Amino acid sequence: MSAEIICVGTEILLGDILNTNCQYLARQLASLGIPHYYQTVVGDNPSRLQQVVDIASRRSSILIFTGGLGPTPDDLTTETIASFFNTPLEEKTEIIEDIKAKFAQRGRKMTPSNYKQALVPKGAKILPNPLGTAPGMIWQPKPNLTILTFPGVPIEMQKMWSETAVPFLKSQGWGQAIIYSRMLRFRGIGESTLAEKVTHLFDLANPTVAPYASKGEVRLRISARAKSEAEAIALIEPVAQEIQAIAGLDYFGSDDDTLASVVGRELQQAGETLAVAESCTGGGLGEMLTSIPGSSAYFLGGIIAYANQVKLSLLEVNARDLEQQGAVSNIVAEQMALGAKKLLGSSWGLSITGIAGPGGGTETKPVGLVYIGLATPDEKSASFAYRFGSIKARSLIRYYSACNALDLLRRKLQVRANQ
Amino acid sequence: MSAEIICVGTEILLGDILNTNCQYLARQLASLGIPHYYQTVVGDNPSRLQQVVDIASRRSSILIFTGGLGPTPDDLTTETIASFFNTPLEEKTEIIEDIKAKFAQRGRKMTPSNYKQALVPKGAKILPNPLGTAPGMIWQPKPNLTILTFPGVPIEMQKMWSETAVPFLKSQGWGQAIIYSRMLRFRGIGESTLAEKVTHLFDLANPTVAPYASKGEVRLRISARAKSEAEAIALIEPVAQEIQAIAGLDYFGSDDDTLASVVGRELQQAGETLAVAESCTGGGLGEMLTSIPGSSAYFLGGIIAYANQVKLSLLEVNARDLEQQGAVSNIVAEQMALGAKKLLGSSWGLSITGIAGPGGGTETKPVGLVYIGLATPDEKSASFAYRFGSIKARSLIRYYSACNALDLLRRKLQVRANQ
């Protein structure tokens, strides 16, 4: 038994809309534990849609359609499915009454084209649409095949899914098992290096372990199939602990944790505060830190020192160092961190200065060279060079710079907390 | 001749990621005038992927794969495609050298698992990946069938598409008819209001006009089909001018313009500079401004005044005003803008103070209340209240706050420029 999602709409093929319905339904199926192996998008074209129904009905047992239920001539999902299974359409009086009532509520009259929406294949049940005029259907055209149709409008589809489709699926004995997942997050280790360290876990059957690489971090997802959440967690826990032990400090958190939230938690537990000084990131580091609700408990603020004059006047960067070493240098990064800490009176100071590109690079200081400075509560300071030259995109160099600054501080805080 | 998009990845089937690659590629194919009738998503499973290759290769002549090119065992797109066409894999030395160089740039060593990424089917060409270690391929395994593979990471895929795949497709005689579009961007007007004002243009056949709503702005896309870019532009231009005349100041730019780039252009033309003071956005406004290459020509920097103490000590906000009116108030917003202008010595000062939530709201100052302050070159100041209470998400309230601050300054600059 497996489900397949089929989205009908030429507007998706033209790229005019982002297909968020697929992701919604995919998540729903995963959380219900209903396996789901294929998603297909096809345009408003009867012969190609019939071909898709043909393929899908031979490899999947639940077909979930979205789109093509409206009143216009290019909405042809219902009639095409019915025609594929050689089943006549019949008009449902209750749908006509419902559409009429909805038009009346808005002071309008049902148009002739809406009558089309009252047609369903003989034997199909109506899947009511509380928010719109396009109802769906639940139909079993042959043994071991169930078809559910939904309009393409996400808010209507979602309400119909949760109010009618999910109870129906459960009544059929589907969606009883639970799939529960935990996402482990890592930074400072490549996907391939981490994968090699935990490769023996990729063969597990339950829970399963799978790697994901995303912008600036690596993730491992542990998924367990079980009868209850507690049972799933019991399966996940030992594997999670094993991975964390292997990864050490490269593991920074799980699920909704971010580098900013982990840094915030550590600072708050220590009763300490942070100030930043940003050059090439222009505020991106502060933006990340303050994305966390309640960050005012430990984040005081900072200086966006984009112009050199600001580095000199507010952060008290030494003029000679700035001139001799340049704004993108270890010494200036350190002085910026110390300056932010002093000016704002925080426990920690964290700074970023670098060349985000595309211009401004030289042979000795190429685009992507970034220095991160750290001033510690005991008045020490240090700085670290990073080279993101291979990344090239300005936005990514800036994003990685801010992430690495947070990660640098996170490691310091966690090493200290573990002592 | 038609193309088909095949996205490989169990993470898409689980709903872990939104499939934005499909939309990007769909738009690209539309703009090249290459027909495209199907999109398929399949998991990291060799037999199901083979089945999908089988179906797609019989109905489409260009197969575009994304995902499954990484170094881990579940990345199996290349080997599965090769196996379907009974073609052996061969190791490309140049890929190994490229991966080694990329690892070396970051001071790391290539891992054994990366060698897998150097394998391509015999006869396939490498599709270089300038931003990552996973190259794709261009392969014609049989007459009238071309396969292109890309990694799933959007930024890598997009660069590979535009730099290598598009020139390749054009060299094969595909994508010769031109669909050329201009995206007009608006802020401060709702999608339906704008649509009503230009409703007579929606019936045009060539160029076509279509509305899009996206996060924080409304867009109208004008698309013309023509034999040359010049011919398409000649069709688009009068329609664009009509729309701009109708929209007035709510129109802010087209195509790659952003609020930050338009503000930057105006400031640079006037030879003026800007400093910011940010509370609830925590650096997000500065981050937007510095996302524009060359922004150091007009953006000096700013103060992230997250803690009230920073507002008092650095921005010289009046202590009594802060106490009586609160940090989220017209007067404090104005004083913050003036303070940033004075402290950094800029022509303009722009400030944001508000309640981003989810906590911190009161009956008189609910979550979503945001004040934006502006200090002008002639030493005047003003502030404006915005209520984003209906938006609810902290991240969106912060994003809209920064956008509205930029839009406020943009309008001032453009009104002055038009005088």
Image: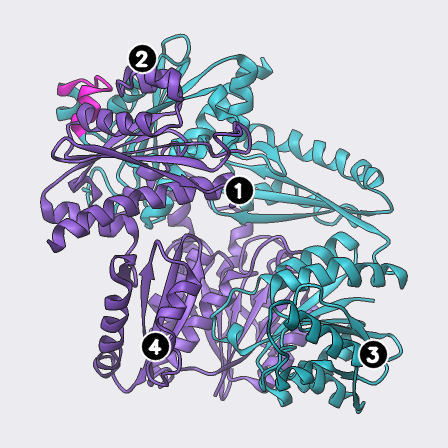
Chain colours: A cyan, B purple
Q: Earlier in the sequence, mark 3 or mark 2?
A: 3
Q: In which quarter of the image is residue B164?
A: bottom left
Q: Mark 4 points at which residue?
A: B223
Q: Which of marks 2 and 4 is in front?
A: 4
Question: Residues at marks 3 and 2, common chain?
Answer: yes
Three-letter amino acid code at the position of disc 1 = Ala
**SS for dot 1:** loop
Q: Mark 3 points at which residue?
A: A124
Question: Residues at marks 1 and 4, common chain?
Answer: yes
Query: Residue at the spot x=63%, y=55% of the render?
Result: B11
Three-letter amino acid code at the position of disc 3 = Ala
Q: Residues within 10 Å of mark 3 (few under 14, many from 20)?
A: some
Query: Residue at the spot x=32%, y=45% of the render?
Result: A389
Q: Does the magenta stretch include residue A135?
A: no
Q: Pointer 3 indicates a residue of which chain? A: A
Q: Nearer the viewer, residue A260 or A293?
A: A293
Residue A413 placement, left or right of A340? right
Q: Mark 2 points at which residue?
A: A342
Question: Residues at marks 1 and 2, common chain?
Answer: no
In this rendering, the answer to whether B100 lies above or below B227 is: above
Three-letter amino acid code at the position of disc 4 = Ser
Q: Is residue A316 magenta?
A: yes
